[in-house]
Amino acid sequence: MTSPVIPADLAAWCSRNDARAQDELFAFLRIPSVSAKSEHQSDCAAAAAFVADALTTIGFDAEIVATDGHPIVVGEWRKAGPDAPTLLIYGHYDVQPAEPLELWTSPAFEPTIRDGRIYARGSVDDKGQLYLHIKALEAHLVVRGTLPVNVIVIAEGEEEVGSVNLEQFLEREQQRLRCDAVVISDSCMFAPGIPSILSSLRGMAYVQIDVRGAKGDLHSGMYGGAVVNPAMALARILATMHDANGRVAIDGFYDKVLPFPEAVRAGMRALPHSDAELMHEVGVAALGGEPGYTTLERLWTRPTCEVNGLLSGYTGEGAKTVLPAVSMAKVSFRLVPDQDPDQIVELVRRHVARVTPAGVTASVTAMHGGRPWRADLKGPIIEAGKRALTAAFGREPVITGEGGSIPVVGDFERILGAPVLLMGFGLPGENAHAPNEWISVENYRLGIRAAATLIDEFARAR
Amino acid sequence: MTSPVIPADLAAWCSRNDARAQDELFAFLRIPSVSAKSEHQSDCAAAAAFVADALTTIGFDAEIVATDGHPIVVGEWRKAGPDAPTLLIYGHYDVQPAEPLELWTSPAFEPTIRDGRIYARGSVDDKGQLYLHIKALEAHLVVRGTLPVNVIVIAEGEEEVGSVNLEQFLEREQQRLRCDAVVISDSCMFAPGIPSILSSLRGMAYVQIDVRGAKGDLHSGMYGGAVVNPAMALARILATMHDANGRVAIDGFYDKVLPFPEAVRAGMRALPHSDAELMHEVGVAALGGEPGYTTLERLWTRPTCEVNGLLSGYTGEGAKTVLPAVSMAKVSFRLVPDQDPDQIVELVRRHVARVTPAGVTASVTAMHGGRPWRADLKGPIIEAGKRALTAAFGREPVITGEGGSIPVVGDFERILGAPVLLMGFGLPGENAHAPNEWISVENYRLGIRAAATLIDEFARAR
């Protein structure tokens, strides 16, 4: 296989148009399209129109599809013909709220360059990473007048509020959206200069455990020592969820866990990760977790059990000698393929029932769940992604994982039946949901080149 | 020893004066002397004056001693001479707030008789139990013109707000208050018709445990599985505090525990207690606690470890995937002789340090403590109390314990060096700190007779 390069014609166009691509992104970033706030509804509509216009300008058919919330923009270019493959590019034009505003060094909706970074709300999440694809498509259409594949662009406006209308849209438009691969740029590179393909996302099973004892709070002097304490019972229940080594000790919890391929694990172990830096970043003197795995493996490839909240009895200042009637814990489990959220909740329910002491009752309520996801890491779109990133960044991408969830990824794969490539251009510390969000100027530029190259490589790989 | 009886002259006086003794108590109960509320300051002063007047009327010298809070009434009758013993009677004229008022069947400060009970705030805690002693003293002074012992009456007005000025007063007036015994009626009988001497009070060591992990809350997806979770760590720390059988598992916790005399334990085991009734009362399907003891022994004679409060992370509605930075538990230990609150806190500190996992830190903050207390159950005042109660109720008193604390008891014993008799006339379900507080009409009357008989028996026993 030849060493991949950015096609010269596209590279030349990119160089001539970097400044304009940045100016246009700035205009996009100035629209405060905060999906969570009703007062920004017209701004969300304006951002949708901006994307539709940008697509129309480069030669796409664009439609703004109304939903019960913010609209979904669908751009289509199908002139490659029915025998050519179809690539679907997904991104979102909505952004997180900018508050607290006083913590921004420059205004959230006035893009500002400092130290090679474009600071603005939405710069990296996800306007910059969406718009770089549109510029890549423009490169093809301007330089060559055509694209070697059919392309569908979907830009939604509700990603930051849970993509509440996307799944239904995908199901309704399943025929129209048929495609051979999906590419999403809404994630991070492992480190500056290290292009990355995100190959796995953890799923989630979130439960609330409520322990009930006496029918009301009791005086701990008058009843303590004979009436079972629901707060202590809860602590004991939670303590049974891990063994002494930090492994989850719920019967059957690991039964469905697929081992990650040794090559992927080896790749992760080879990544330049420093536990000391992570400890410094979060401010702890030691890390913990399941034995037998590196930190990155624990975060990316292993399931967890975490307490997210605890509440019982008296929590104010000073001392109150109450024997609480109830106690509550929020507990979530990060899942990996092929763990199933519903099955995990059922295992937790059985476990809690088994370890709850007499004298109290415990209930387990499922709060929400999401399936884990793992890329196949084979096939045309992955190969194309690897080559495109290698061409743009001058080194092969690493394969990373992500401890959190991006629920839409599973939706695309399940509903459209197409493999998903997660090719992100963010960087650690990008403040995606915090003040002073930024995208690297260089990554935005290299992202355009990678996305442009991806089109050619995908056409060729197939 | 002859079977004890109420002296006939005193009994006759009591019969003639029961109606008046009740009327006077009603007047006392109408004064809303709520010590916790500043708007009732003049009511507290009025209640103090009421007590002082009642003492003066029967022939005592009475003084109202100002404090930084509500005044302390001191009544003295010393005409028995320097060779006669001195008995100190302690009670309090202040009452708990009456709120929530709408739950009272009759007004809190308008005493009302229903079903043989006097309903009013303060009826049993402690105005009725204080005033019955004053009527008993009156019986002696009216019928015989004298008392066989010197008597000091102390009525404080801050018992319901922690007796904040009493200890200092006792220390300052130590010489003047020298006495041979202290009698306090501010507790409960085991059951109707069963007179009781309260022989032990549990002490208390109350701590707050704070567990700290990362310097801020983290995303449980991005860090979960590698950064130690302070909420789970807290649960695991708390779970180590008992063994699987419910015994406190803190090194050295039981070292100072004195076994209760077998006779006292046998007496407790013989009391007509029903676990089924207790379970029904509090609404649980099973009781728990330390093995090897009955429920009453657990409540009265054994130390405990209870979680009084838990707080960490997200506790609102729904799900939030936070890996909390901190977690907090309020934990209290009921203590029995000779456990020392400060030593117990130190043992807890050591235990927590030993079991806290790497990756988090835990601190133990002492909140408040109180020493346990146990009566000697020998000596003149105990013998006199037993005979007086037998005379008044027609059966020997049982020896009970109390799971809670009455801190002033230890203060009297320590500062004045005199044994304390706890001879209470309340009953289970008396609603001492709740709406619809009551004292049994019969117990108020028998209480006067028992208190009057106690004087003679104490003079004779010594």
Image (spheres, coloured by chain):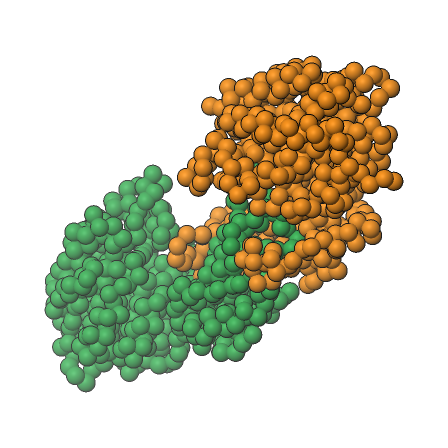
Chain colours: A orange, B green
Dividing the picture into quarters, in which one does residue B24 lie? bottom left
Q: Which residue is located at x 71 percent, y 41 percent?
A: A393
Q: Position of residue B12 (x, y in %)?
A: 23, 64
Would you say B226 lies left or right of B10 here? Answer: right
Q: Nearer the viewer, residue A85 or A259?
A: A85
Q: Which residue is located at x 84 percent, y 17 percent?
A: A82
Q: Nearer the viewer, residue B402 or B388?
A: B402
Q: Nearer the viewer, residue A255 or B406?
A: A255
Would you say B360 lies left or right of B155 here? Answer: right
Residue B297 drawn above or below residue B432: below
Q: Which residue is located at x 50 percent, y 76 percent?
A: B257
Dividing the picture into quarters, in which one does residue A395 lie? top right
Q: Which residue is located at x 45 percent, y 52 percent?
A: A314
Q: Position of residue B140 (x, y in %)?
A: 19, 69
Would you say B421 lies left or right of B356 here? Answer: left
Dividing the picture into quarters, in which one does residue A118 lie? top right
Q: Position of residue A22 (x, y in %)?
A: 58, 30
Number of callouts in the render?
Answer: 0
Residue B301 drawn above or below residue B274: below
